[in-house]
Image (cartoon, rainbow, N blue to C red):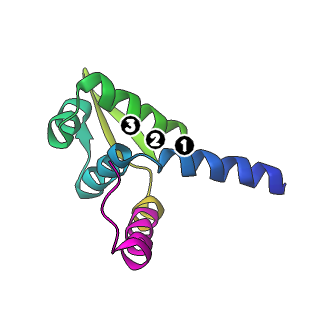
């Protein structure tokens, strides 16, 4: 049981380990969006944005809904928004004096 929990936590941790994916979570915390809209807002190529979204989806941090030919992404729940806010708080409290990683 503990190993299964660790494996799931590892998947979530890896999904959160990318600055680009954190930015996508921040954008999705505001409202649901299409991959094109997210790519423009995050200044990413659509293919790169799509790959990041698939990583977030595999970690079950985002979900999708189809409307015709468009696919809309949104956070999987309020707990994901709380997780993202918590990561931001911990980062600010413990790493606030460090320059952002590049």
Which callout, 2 or 3, points to the residue nearer the camera?
2
49, above or below 15, in the image: above
Whole-Å distance between the Cαs marked 3 and 1?
13 Å
Residue at x-position 73% and y-position 53%: 6
Whole-Å distance between the Cαs marked 2 and 1?
5 Å
38, above or below 26, in the image: above
The reply to whether callout 2 and callout 3 are in contact (CB within 8 Å) is no
Q: Earlier in the sequence, mark 2 or mark 3?
A: 2
Which callout, 3 or 1, points to the residue nearer the camera?
1
**Which residue position holds label 2?**
56
**Which residue position holds label 1?**
59
Element on which disc 2 rests? helix
Residue at x-position 44% and y-position 73%: 90
Classified by dominant secondary structure, the portion drawn in magenta counts as: helix
Decide: few, some or many residues near mark 1? Use Cα within 10 Å; few <14, some 14-19, many ≥20. Answer: some
Q: Tell me, yes or no, whether the highlighted magenta stretch contains residue 88.
A: yes
Element on which disc 3 rests? strand
**Which residue position holds label 3?**
64
The reply to whether callout 3 and callout 1 are in contact (CB within 8 Å) is no
Q: Percent from the top left, x then y, of residue 21? A: 37, 45
Residues in magenta, as a range: 83-102
Whole-Å distance between the Cαs marked 2 and 3?
11 Å
99 relative position to 59: left or right? left
Q: Percent from the top left, x then y, of residue 36? A: 19, 30
8 relative position to 85: left or right? right
Q: Earlier in the sequence, mark 3 or mark 1?
A: 1
């Amino acid at each position: 049981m503990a190993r299964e929990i660790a494996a799931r936590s590892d998947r979530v941790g890896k999904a959160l380990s990318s600055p680009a994916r954190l930015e996508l979570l921040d954008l999705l915390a505001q409202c649901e969006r299409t991959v094109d809209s997210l790519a423009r807002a995050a200044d990413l190529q659509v293919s790169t944005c799509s790959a990041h979204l698939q990583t977030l989806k595999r970690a079950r941090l985002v979900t999708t809904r189809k409307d015709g030919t468009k696919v809309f992404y949104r956070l999987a729940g309020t707990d994901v928004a709380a997780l993202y806010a918590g990561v931001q708080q911990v980062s600010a409290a413990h790493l606030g004096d460090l320059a952002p990683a590049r």
